[in-house]
Amino acid sequence: MSSETQSPPPTREAIDDRETGAVGRRSFLRKMAIAGASLAPVLALLVASSAMADDTILKFKGGIVEIPVIGTPAVPVANVVRTIQPAGTPWVIRALSAEVKADGRIHVEGRGLLLAGGNEVGTNGGASVFASLICGTTVSSTPMANAVALAADGDFTIDDMLTPAPSNGCDNPVLLIRTVPSGVWFTAGIPLVIEDD
């Protein structure tokens, strides 16, 4: 019977789990540092573009309806706002909000702009509207050619540019929603105060 000598199995050194964990943590932290360094410029661009995108200079919330004649019954006066004539029939509006950007972009959402009197009471009167922003004595308007037709329920959205672009220091702002072709006003926006951060 032949006997072969068997060599002992190779021995493995015991691995200290604490050491493996430390190496793993160092590797993970190194990868996170690399990822963080790569993302830093992207995050900086996002923050900068977010700040640039929010260049809102004016906000309006709520609408004041047009009343064609003010004054007393004995001395009626047309409700002219900074030289802009009122519509001849009263109108109502359910809701209005608007934002004006520094470059002149304007976004207006109107709900329920309808006639409040006359034979067509409760209808949109077939009107199309545009926006005018008055800063002091300077009138900036969206193009009349881009006037938006009121929906049957009086809803409308204006996304356009004011010409000329308003200055950042808009003095005593007035936002009027007006109709074509006459240019008379239906409703005015209520300005909101924008808090500086």
Image (spheres, rainbow, N blue to C red):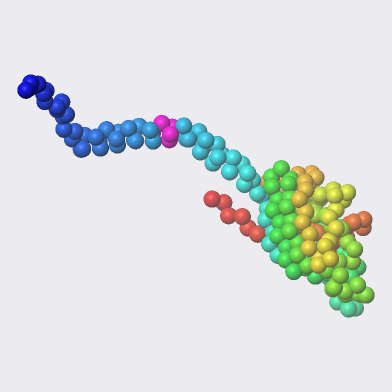
User: Would residue 108 be found to the left or right of residue 75 on screen?
Assistant: left
Residue 142, relative to residue 32: is it above or below? below
- Residue 181 visible in this rendered orientation of the protein: yes
User: Would residue 143 be found to the left or right of residue 44 on screen?
Assistant: right
User: Would residue 171 be found to the left or right of residue 34 on screen?
Assistant: right
Question: What residue lies at 85% left-to-right and 58% top-to-bottom?
Answer: 149
What predominant SS class does the magenta segment belong to?
Answer: helix
Q: Where, by quadrant of the figure, is residue 115 drawn?
A: bottom right
Task: State the residue lying farthest toward the bottom.
Answer: 73
Question: What residue lies at 65% left-to-right and 49% top-to-bottom?
Answer: 56
Residue 156, position in %: x, y? Answer: 79, 59
Residue extent of the magenta highlight? 33-37
Question: What residue lies at 86% left-to-right and 66% top-to-bottom?
Answer: 124
Residue 175, relative to residue 163: is it above or below? below
Residue 65, relative to residue 193: is it above or below? below
Residue 189, position in %: x, y? Answer: 74, 61
**In-front residue for pair 7/51:** 7
- Residue 76 visible in this rendered orientation of the protein: no
Give the total number of marks visible in the rendering: 0
Residue 178, position in %: x, y? Answer: 84, 58
**In-front residue for pair 167/152:** 152
Task: State the residue lying farthest toward the front.
Answer: 1
Question: What residue lies at 59% left-to-right and 40% top-to-bottom?
Answer: 49
Location of the N terminus by quadrant is top left
Indicate yes or no whether the magenta region holds residue 23. Answer: no
Q: Where, by quadrant of the figure, is residue 36 drawn?
A: top left
Residue 47, position in %: x, y? Answer: 54, 41
